[in-house]
Amino acid sequence: MRQQKADMTERSFLQMVEDSRLVLAQLPEILTPSQIAVFVSMEDEKLAAQRVYVQQARLEAGMSPDFDE
């Protein structure tokens, strides 16, 4: 059960990374450079927190905290 949770959180994280990349590619059409910088900072913080969550889930499942991003 814990390994399934770890796998699910890892897949969710990878989808978040991809979604973020796609959104960031479209931002120059609607935001100013300074607004983009703030958005990038917010996305970086969100992804960092999610990365830690994935690592914790992997540890709880008896797995290495490292995963292929």
Image (cartoon, helix red, strand yellow):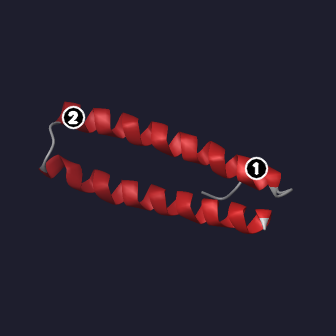
Residue at image x 21%, y 34%? 35
Q: What element carries label 2?
A: helix
Amino acid type indicated by mark 1: Pro
Q: In this view, does 7 lie to the left or right of 18?
A: right
Identify the image quadrant of residue 21.
bottom left
Residue at image x 54%, y 41%? 48
What residue is disc 1 on?
A: 65
Q: Are marks 2 and 1 in contact (CB under 8 Å)?
A: no
Q: Residue furthest front?
A: 1
Q: How far apart are marks 2 and 1 (CA)?
A: 34 Å
Q: In this view, does 24 lie to the left or right of 34?
A: right
Identify the image quadrant of residue 67.
bottom right
Residue 2 is situated, as x and y percent measured from the top left of the image, at 78, 62
Around disc 2, counting alpha carbons within 10 Å, would you say few (fewer than 14), some (14 to 19), or many (20 or more)? few
Q: Is residue 44 left or right of residue 25?
A: right
Q: Is residue 29 left or right of residue 4?
A: left
Residue at image x 29%, y 34%? 37
Q: Is residue 47 visible?
A: yes
* Above or below, comparing residue 50 to residue 62 in the picture: above
Q: Is residue 66 visible?
A: no
Q: Which mark is residue 12?
A: none
Residue at image x 73%, y 47%? 56
What residue is disc 2 on?
A: 35
Residue 40 is situated, as x and y percent measured from the top left of the image, at 35, 39
Residue 23 is situated, as x and y percent measured from the top left of the image, at 30, 55
Around disc 1, counting alpha carbons within 10 Å, would you say few (fewer than 14), some (14 to 19), or many (20 or more)? some
Q: Is mark 1 on a helix, strand or loop?
A: loop
Q: Which of 26 and 60 is in front in this view?
A: 60
Amino acid type indicated by mark 2: Gln
